[in-house]
Image: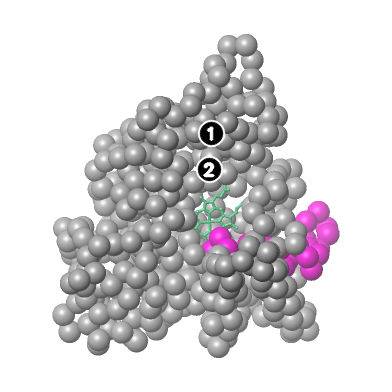
């Protein structure tokens, strides 16, 4: 609760365009620095932005005031599990889901992940060039997902279509009403698709996540069919584009910083720390949202009930209060407590899977394609709004 000692939250001095810029600029880090200095801002009445490391951590940890419930209508007819559920129910779901994405589980799928990334590299390596975004980054995380869900390669196109229907509804139609109808139809198709796979797994369980969901229990109660479908729906949103986008950011950096590329080629042992550092620097999910469901405060600033709170993970990740020399990209950083996977109870469920996919891609790619750069004529990189990512990242290498 806010008390008498809290200050009113400040408007953003000189940062009026920061929210927009932060989403679409190729290099947002300088702007993040200005935001960190202001820590807590109110760019428009009723919208509070928290940006310093301390403010972001305080907000993420205070889930009682800063709620995740009720966000995101992506065609789904029920809340996304567990992202749009607050504790205490949230804890039950995480208890059940966390073990499925634990590091040990990821060890078990590492060879499969490597096989899948090489499947895509095989297709273009002899050509000496590729559209990295389209030919690898967008496809590979969905292919890994097929493995986790026990689905055949032939379902890759279906998964991609579902994903695009949720995340790029503008591609379906530009009219807002028609778009909502199209999103609902896409969601129905997703529920139907996973529903029929679940029917099959009920008859013949396999060693995959879907079969596990059917067996799983919370306090002696099995998950309902709706629960499982809502979890699957969220996985399509949270687990696919995030990794795709991260890969495009990583390769844009490496293709334009040959010294970093060479470090990875010469010493693949630094890949795990390089992944953490690039996650920190790029922060592909730059911003999270919460709703203040009671009066609260962040870093001594009052936040009124009903405010929408935007949380800048990107800014927090370059705050010197959390990391030494934040503007130096050091691939061998030993201590790197970045917030690219968020924090508090909703911290990313799939962080170990994401890390595994990113590490394996860097390892396999640099083993097979050590020298690469931006394709001449395609040096201007486009970072569209939304999660931070590069459209049509064109790479070339000697054959
Ligand atoms: C580099 C890739 C990834 C990044 C940067 C990322 C980032 C994040 C962030 C910042 C959150 C916190 C959301 C919030 O607090 O509102 C989150 C939550 C989540 N992520 Fe990830 N994520 C990635 C990959 C994945 C993957 C591969 C999965 C696959 C299972 C996944 C599943 C989830 C789920 C289910 C949640 C919700 C957790 C909860 O509400 O308890 N993520 N992710």
Quadrant containing ligand 1 reads bottom right
Residue 104 visible (yes or no):
no
Magenta stretch?
Answer: 216-239
At mark 2, the secondary structure is loop
Answer with the quarter of the image where residue 336 lies: top left
Number of the label disc, if any, that sits on residue 197: none
Q: Is residue 284 left or right of residue 293?
A: left
For label 1, the crowd category at 10 Å Cα-Cα, with few meaning under 14, some 14 to 19 and many 20 or more, is few
Farthest right residue in view: 221
Farthest front residue in view: 175
Q: Residue at x 54, y 76 (%)?
A: 160
Q: Quadrant of the C terminus?
A: bottom left
Q: Is residue 165 left or right of residue 322?
A: right
Residue 341 visible (yes or no):
yes
Where is 396 relative to 73, above or below?
below
Q: Quadrant of the N terminus?
A: top right
Q: Position of residue 355 (x, y in %)?
A: 43, 60
Q: Residue at x 39, y 75 (%)?
A: 134
Q: Position of residue 161 (x, y in %)?
A: 57, 77
For label 2, the crowd category at 10 Å Cα-Cα, with few meaning under 14, some 14 to 19 and many 20 or more, is some
At mark 1, the secondary structure is strand
Q: Residue at x 34, y 70 (%)?
A: 392
Number of the label disc, if any, that sits on residue 44: 1
Is residue 365 part of the magenta span, yes or no? no
Residue 49 or residue 372, whichever sits in front: 49
The residue that disc 2 covers is 343
Q: Residue at x 57, y 67 (%)?
A: 174
Where is 99 relative to 14, above or below?
below
Farthest top residue in view: 4
């Amino acid at each position: 609760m806010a008390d008498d000692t809290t200050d009113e939250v400040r408007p953003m001095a000189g940062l009026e365009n920061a929210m927009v810029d932060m989403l679409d600029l190729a290099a947002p880090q300088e702007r993040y620095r200005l935001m960190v200095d202001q820590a807590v801002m109110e760019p428009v009445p009723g919208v509070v932005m928290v940006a310093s490391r301390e403010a972001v951590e305080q907000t993420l940890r205070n889930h009682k005031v800063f709620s995740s419930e009720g966000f995101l209508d992506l065609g789904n007819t029920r809340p996304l599990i567990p992202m749009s559920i607050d504790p205490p129910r949230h804890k039950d779901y995480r208890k059940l889901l966390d073990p499925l994405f634990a590091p040990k589980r990821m060890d078990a799928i590492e060879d499969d992940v490597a096989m899948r990334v090489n499947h895509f590299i095989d297709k273009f390596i002899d050509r000496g060039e590729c559209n990295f975004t389209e030919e690898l980054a967008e496809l590979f995380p969905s292919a890994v997902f097929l493995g986790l869900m026990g689905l055949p390669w032939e379902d890759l196109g279906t998964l991609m279509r579902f994903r695009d229907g949720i995340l790029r509804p503008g591609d379906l139609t530009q009219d807002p009403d028609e778009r909502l109808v199209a999103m609902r139809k896409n969601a129905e198709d997703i529920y139907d698709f996973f529903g029929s796979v679940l029917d099959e797994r009920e008859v013949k369980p396999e060693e995959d996540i879907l079969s596990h969901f059917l067996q799983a229990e919370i306090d002696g109660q099995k998950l309902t069919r709706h629960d499982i479908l809502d979890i699957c729906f969220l996985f399509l949103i949270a687990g696919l584009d995030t990794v795709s986008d991260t890969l495009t950011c990583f390769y844009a950096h490496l293709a334009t910083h040959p010294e970093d590329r060479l470090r990875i080629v010469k010493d693949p042992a630094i890949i795990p720390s390089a992944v953490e550092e690039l996650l920190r620097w790029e922060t592909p999910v730059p911003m999270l949202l919460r709703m203040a469901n009671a009066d609260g405060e962040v870093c001594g600033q009052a936040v009124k009930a009903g405010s929408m709170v935007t949380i800048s993970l990107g800014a927090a990740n370059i705050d010197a209060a959390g990391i030494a020399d934040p503007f130096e990209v050091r691939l061998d950083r030993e201590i790197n407590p970045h917030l690219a996977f968020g924090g508090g109870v909703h911290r990313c469920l799939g962080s170990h899977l994401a890390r595994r996919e990113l590490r394996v891609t860097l390892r396999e790619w640099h083993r097979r394609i050590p020298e690469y750069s931006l394709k001449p004529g395609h040096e201007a990189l486009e970072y569209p709004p939304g999660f931070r990512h590069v459209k049509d990242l064109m790479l070339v290498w000697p054959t």
